[in-house]
Amino acid sequence: MSRAVPVSLANPSAPVDNSSQWLELGKLANANPEFTALELKAFYVIGLIDDICQSVDWLLKAEDAWPEKYLPAFSVFASGVDLLGRCLTGNWNTGSQENLKVGFHYLAQPSLAPPEKRLLSTTAKSSIVHQTNVTKYTVSDLVDLRNYTAHGQATTGNTLPGVHIELLDHFPKLIGDAMGIYWRGLQNIEEYCLRLGNAKISAYSNRAKPLRDTLEYFSVPGNSIGGLFYRLNWQIGI
């Protein structure tokens, strides 16, 4: 059955957690009424991750960005990576940090093939996400650093690699590439749709901005998912 929508996912009718919530949010955002709950959820997630990255951008443009706001900026960014990971895993285990691990690993090695829902410890420790002029950051390093910024400690007890002014430099490119491939996956591979539908992501009932912003962005011909993030510049000087 054809629908009058500009873009459709591989399985737009995949079951969605709290589907009525997404349909109501679509009405609030004046979205195309033929979009399904899953499609609205996908657009909202993209808009929310973009919002998170814009917050990082704001922090890094402050006069005291280094060093006062650098760790908070990384922590905010990591929340966006966690959200992406939750969509990639389908939030299969809310009691662990697999969503964050899978999210960072996907940034390092994005693929059209749906990722493993659980990242092996050896892979997390060896998978390099970003390398500065000073050190390499693995998935485990970044997860520990996020735990430190959020809770004041690294839950694994590992020694943190240190925070360098180049840590966030390349992440706009990395997340832009990853989000672009993830979006292609949603359009072509049903498993991505099933996992997104299952992911326990809630939206404030009166906050349609992330959804509305994404729909407006894609209304412009030629705009791409990656372009949302490539326009960011997280390099700062001292």
Image (tube, rainbow, N blue to C red):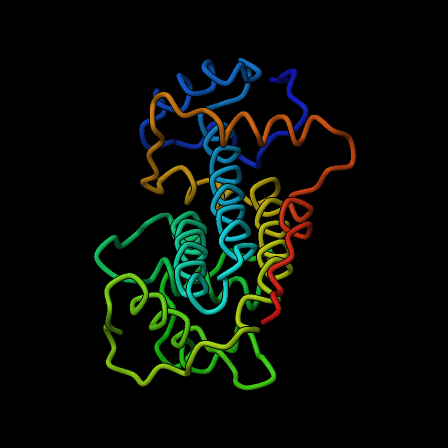
The x, y position of residue 74, in whole percent, is: 44, 62
Q: Residue furthest front?
A: 63
Residue 118 against residue 203 in the figure, above or below: below
The answer to whether residue 7 is left or right of residue 50 is right
- Measuring 60% from the left and 17% from the top, which residue is drawn there? 1
The answer to whether residue 100 is left or right of residue 152 is right
Residue 28 against residue 149 in the figure, above or below: above
The x, y position of residue 147, in whole percent, is: 30, 67
- Where on the picture, by quarter, is residue 112? bottom right
Q: In this orientation, which residue lies closer to the viewer: 155 or 57?
A: 57
Q: In this orientation, which residue lies closer to the viewer: 118 or 97?
A: 97
The answer to whether residue 133 is left or right of residue 16 is right
The answer to whether residue 80 is left or right of residue 17 is right
- Measuring 46% from the left and 82% from the top, which residue is drawn there? 126
Q: In this orientation, which residue lies closer to the viewer: 6 or 222?
A: 222
The x, y position of residue 91, in whole percent, is: 33, 49
- Where on the picture, by quarter, is residue 163? bottom left
Residue 39 against residue 62 in the figure, above or below: above
Label tally: 0
- Measuring 37% from the left and 48% from the top, which residue is drawn there? 90
Which quadrant is the C terminus positioned in? bottom right
The x, y position of residue 6, in whole percent, is: 68, 24
- Measuring 50% from the left and 77% from the top, which residue is drawn there? 164
